Amino acid sequence: MSEFFTDSVFFGAALTLAAYELGAFLRKKTGLAIFSPIIVAAACIIPLLLVLDIDYDTYNMGAQYISYLLTPATVALAIPLYRRIALLKKHLGAILCGLGSGILAGGLGTLGLCLLFDLEHSQYVTLLPKSVTTAIGMGLTEELGGVVAITAVAIMIAGNLGPVFAEFLFRIFRIRHPIARGLALGNASHAVGTSKAMELGEVEGAMSSLAIAVAGLMTVVLAPIFATFL
């Protein structure tokens, strides 16, 4: 049975798209943030690969075709930002202060938790880039001497938790301004958070896509400084 799937060139892509569509369907029907398409897709694909005894490399032979679309999809995030360029210029100071505060809060929070749980330096620097895009985070971790594989997992967890709890936290802390919402999602949960921000509105999506780039650059600059704290 497994050979039937592994012999198909597009098995990985078809499985990924089907699992994602299932998640999107459940999210729309239930309205529950926990049914994020990415979470549902991972929860479906991993057990299926284990049951069918299909290794990751075989699955990725087809799934990699979806990965090719990641770059143009990321570039496309600039479109809503361009449409809201006047808004960006008007609130530039507040936006930069907000992003800087988010980076500091994330770094200090990671430091505090590492001290609380008595983690080592390598573990600390592994978790520092958890809220930036995978490409930046993994490269930064390698440079700082951390464990790249764990950083990838931490980035994935941060990315998925943001959209799940975003609306709940916005209500609790009465965060209503679209710029603040967008910056928070992009700063904390990078690209996955941006997909949620776009669901909330065009301004939220534009600010979240901005946050991905600016927060990534700030993290690259500040992470080596934070790395010296432990």
Image (cartoon, rainbow, N blue to C red):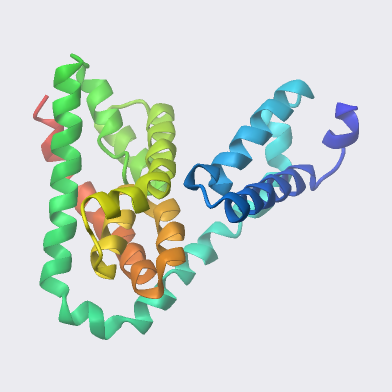
Q: In the displayed image of the protein, which residue is found farthest to the top?
A: 118
Taking the spot 71% from the left edge, 22% from the top edge, the residue there is 50
Q: Position of residue 221 (x, y in %)?
A: 17, 49
Out of 218 and 14, give the one closest to the viewer.
Answer: 14
Q: Residue at x 25, y 55 (%)?
A: 215
- The quarter holding residue 113 reads top left
**Of 63 and 221, which appears nearest the observer?**
63
Q: Quadrant of the N terminus?
A: top right
Q: Residue at x 62, y 41 (%)?
A: 41
Quarter in which the C terminus is drawn: top left
x and y percentages locating residue 39 in the rendered image: 54, 40
Rendered position, 78 above or below 8: below
| Residue depicted at x 17% and y 67% | 95
Considering only vertical position in the picture, is 149 above or below 13?
above
Looking at the rendered structure, the number of numbered marks drawn on it comes to 0
Give how far across and how far down residue 32 sits, in percent. 51, 47
Estimate the x, y position of residue 194 in percent, counting from the top left: 41, 59
Please indicate, yes or no, whether residue 216 appears anywhere in the rendered image: no
Residue 103 vs residue 173, the one in the foreground: 173
Q: Is residue 67 visible?
A: yes
Report which quarter residue 46 is drawn in.
top right
Left or right: residue 86 compared with residue 48: left
Report the side of 202 relative to 25 (left or right).
Answer: left
